[in-house]
Image: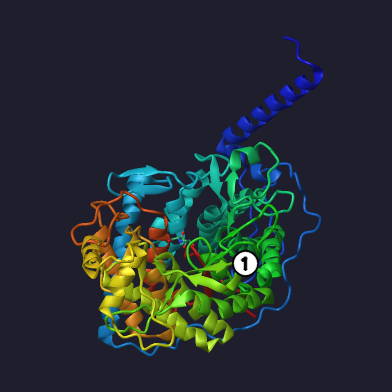
């Protein structure tokens, strides 16, 4: 069949693209010459970094070049008030108890690490029941990369050396996925390499950080330079034009700044900082014009760069780390970018009033829960606060404690304690002493003493479970019984516990910030409860229902944050306070500590 000239050109171009793509994705690993890095001394960042210009993600043609690249700020970093409490000398017995606890966490970590090594080496995750593996994060060894800095911090230097020795087998030019999550790739992989580099100064880690950074940078190659967060990586690799997505989660697009800025700080190449800073500027510009001014909606439109249209507001799932990164960016950059403090203070001036509630409890606990807020008719005036609490939002106490110290917002310290105590309370309320993913409680009436009222609890159980208005309290009793609701809880919408870190994270931060032993004890209670309910013959697993007595059903899943976050925070809660001091380091949302820029 004759092919018309234009058709033939298209066909030729298509075949060429396929060939290039095939070549690109099948390049042997040793085709990339090793990078010779001329690394700086630990205390300073270099002004330039020799790079492997031949690296595939770097050599791809840019479809939408940026006209100017914002330079990294050059202002002298400033000092901030101390974040950590002054710890007094501990007694012999407390020291002994602390070290025993620390040892127990390390043993749990080592079991998981050894099982990963034996059954899932270089895969993303171990399946801790069957001893198999799977690759939901690209197949780039997510668990290994996420755990690198934990190995270093736990002084497992041999294991660390072995793991770093294996990273040259990770190839970001190949993947098992069609769609890559740019946020997860950034916080787990880029965050993991950067932190391990900060701690060890091993150049191979920086080389890897640059490789994954180059891949991530390609996701910003769109007409408005906003990233494609759920990314067709193969289309991008073949040179196809791409646009950012209209439905983008605010947490995903809003929390790339720490990792990309730190990569620029270390490498001296400002392109990553520039890419992230464009997002920050757009968020800052629209912060006051949302339906709840000061906060951003849960879902934003990255294609049109509209960050102020939407009616759901939360500090929890899907928005969380957008807020978390605001004070953390200030800590990371030594205050070189005051925009982050402004954004944070505006958001935290608004959030407590609309999102926090005190739940009614039988013991009238002075605790808080953070939930979501829904605006009505385009404004917050007739908006409605939800009642859902979540495990994911338990990071919040730690964030508020950090912000309170950095910016001398004394009122926030109380909120930080009450929110953290809310999470500790919820852990202790359930039979396995672990909080499930999501649940509901009864909010106290504003300005009331909030004494325990059994009937009010039961009526709320009926309401939230959509029972008819004439349903009886006996019917509420039946729901409470069937759904195994602890007193004060009205519904459990997601009964899983999937080895998440957030509650132990805030207990750790509050311990370091206040110096109060009760927070370290709470971290210990959480750790022992988790260990008891999730241990398998190999490692630890997510469980499908943590809310009923009896052995929880195992889900055969161990996400990389178990070794990357949960066990790291647990270990640090029982370490000398100088180990990864919050005055020297700031954690990304995947618990990877980055060195803070200091005067
Ligand atoms: C982690 O991957 C990160 O903390 C992220 O911000 C959300 N939560 C998970 C762990 O629960």
Image quadrant where residue 492 sits: bottom left
Q: Secondary structure at mark 1?
A: loop
Q: Is residue 313 left or right of residue 132?
A: right
- Indicate how the structure is coloured in the image: rainbow
Q: Assess mark 1: CB under 8 A from ligand 1? A: no
The residue lying toward the viewer, choosing from 470 and 340, is 470
Q: Is residue 524 visible?
A: no
Other residues around mark 1 within 10 Å, as few (<14) / some (14–19) / many (≥20): some
Residue 315 higher or lower than 137, as above or below: below
Q: Is residue 365 left or right of residue 318?
A: left
* Mark count: 1
Figure quadrant of the N terminus: top right
Q: Residue 552 at x, y = what percent?
A: 23, 56
Figure quadrant of the C terminus: bottom right
Which residue of the protein is positioned furthest toward the top in this rendering?
1
Image quadrant where residue 280 sits: bottom right
Q: Residue 592 at x, y = what percent?
A: 49, 64
Q: Residue 149 at x, y = what percent?
A: 46, 62
The residue lying toward the viewer, choosing from 196 and 519, is 519
Residue drawn where x is 68% and y is 70% of the image: 289
Q: Is residue 29 visible?
A: yes
Residue drawn where x is 24% and y is 66% of the image: 480
Residue drawn where x is 43% and y is 88% of the image: 447
Q: Is residue 487 left or right of residue 412?
A: left
Which residue of the protein is positioned furthest toward the left in this rendering?
550
Q: Residue 156 at x, y = what percent?
A: 38, 62
User: Dot 1 corresponds to which residue?
Assistant: 378
């Amino acid at each position: 069949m004759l092919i018309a000239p234009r058709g033939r050109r298209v066909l030729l171009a298509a075949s060429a693209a396929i060939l290039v793509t095939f070549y690109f994705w099948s390049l042997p690993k040793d085709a990339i010459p090793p990078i010779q890095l001329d690394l700086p001394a630990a205390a300073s960042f270099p002004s330039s970094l020799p790079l492997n210009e031949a690296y595939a993600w770097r050599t791809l043609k840019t479809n939408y070049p940026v006209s100017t690249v914002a330079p990294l700020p050059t202002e002298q970093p400033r000092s901030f008030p101390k974040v950590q409490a002054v710890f007094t000398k501990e007694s012999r017995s407390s020291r002994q108890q602390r070290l025993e606890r620390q040892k127990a966490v390390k043993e749990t970590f080592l079991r998981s690490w050894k099982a990963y090594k034996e059954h899932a080496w270089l895969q993303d995750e171990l399946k801790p029941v069957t001893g198999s593996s799977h690759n939901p994060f690209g197949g780039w060894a997510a668990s290994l990369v996420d755990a690198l800095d934990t190995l270093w911090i736990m002084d497992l230097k041999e294991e660390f050396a072995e793991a770093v020795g294996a990273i040259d087998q990770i190839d970001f030019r190949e993947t098992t996925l069609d769609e890559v999550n740019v946020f997860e790739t950034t916080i787990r992989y880029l965050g993991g390499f950067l932190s391990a580099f900060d701690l060890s100064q091993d150049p191979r880690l920086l080389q890897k950080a640059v490789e994954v950074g180059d891949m991530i940078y390609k996701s910003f190659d769109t007409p408005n330079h906003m990233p494609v967060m759920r990314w067709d990586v193969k289309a991008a690799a073949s040179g196809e034009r791409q646009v950012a997505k209209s439905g983008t989660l605010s947490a995903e697009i809003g929390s790339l700044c720490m990792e990309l800025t730190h990569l620029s700080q270390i490498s001296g190449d400002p392109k990553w900082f520039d890419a992230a800073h464009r997002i920050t500027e757009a968020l800052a510009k629209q912060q006051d014009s949302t339906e709840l001014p000061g906060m951003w909606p849960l879902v934003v439109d990255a294609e049109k760069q509209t960050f102020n249209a939407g009616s759901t507001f939360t500090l929890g799932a899907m928005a969380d780390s957008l807020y978390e990164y605001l004070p953390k960016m200030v800590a990371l950059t030594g205050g070189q970018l005051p925009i982050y403090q402004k954004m944070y203070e505006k958001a935290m001036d608004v959030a407590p009033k609309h999102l926090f509630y005190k739940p009614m409890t039988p013991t009238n606990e002075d605790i808080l829960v953070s939930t979501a807020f829904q605006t009505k008719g385009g404004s917050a005036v007739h908006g409605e606060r939800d009642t859902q609490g979540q495990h994911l939002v338990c990071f919040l106490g730690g964030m508020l404690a950090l912000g309170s110290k950095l910016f001398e917002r004394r009122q926030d310290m109380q909120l930080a304690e009450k929110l953290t105590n809310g999470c500790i309370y919820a852990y202790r309320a359930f039979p396995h002493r672990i909080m499930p993913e999501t649940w509901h409680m009864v909010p106290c009436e504003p300005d009331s003493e909030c004494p325990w009222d059994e009937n009010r609890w039961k009526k709320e159980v009926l309401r939230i479970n959509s029972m008819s208005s004439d349903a009886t309290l006996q019917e509420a009793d039946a729901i409470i019984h069937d759904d195994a609701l602890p007193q004060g809880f009205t519904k459990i919408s997601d009964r899983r516990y999937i080895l998440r870190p957030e509650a132990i994270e805030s207990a750790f931060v509050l311990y370091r910030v206040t110096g109060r032993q009760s927070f370290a004890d709470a971290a210990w209670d959480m750790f022992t409860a988790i260990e008891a309910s999730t241990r398998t013959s190999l490692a630890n697993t997510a469980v499908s229902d943590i809310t009923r007595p009896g052995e929880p059903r195992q889900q055969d899943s161990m996400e990389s944050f178990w070794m990357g976050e949960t066990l790291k925070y647990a270990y640090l809660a029982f370490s000398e306070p100088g180990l990864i001091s919050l005055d020297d380091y700031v954690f990304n949302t995947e618990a990877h500590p980055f060195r803070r820029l200091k005067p």
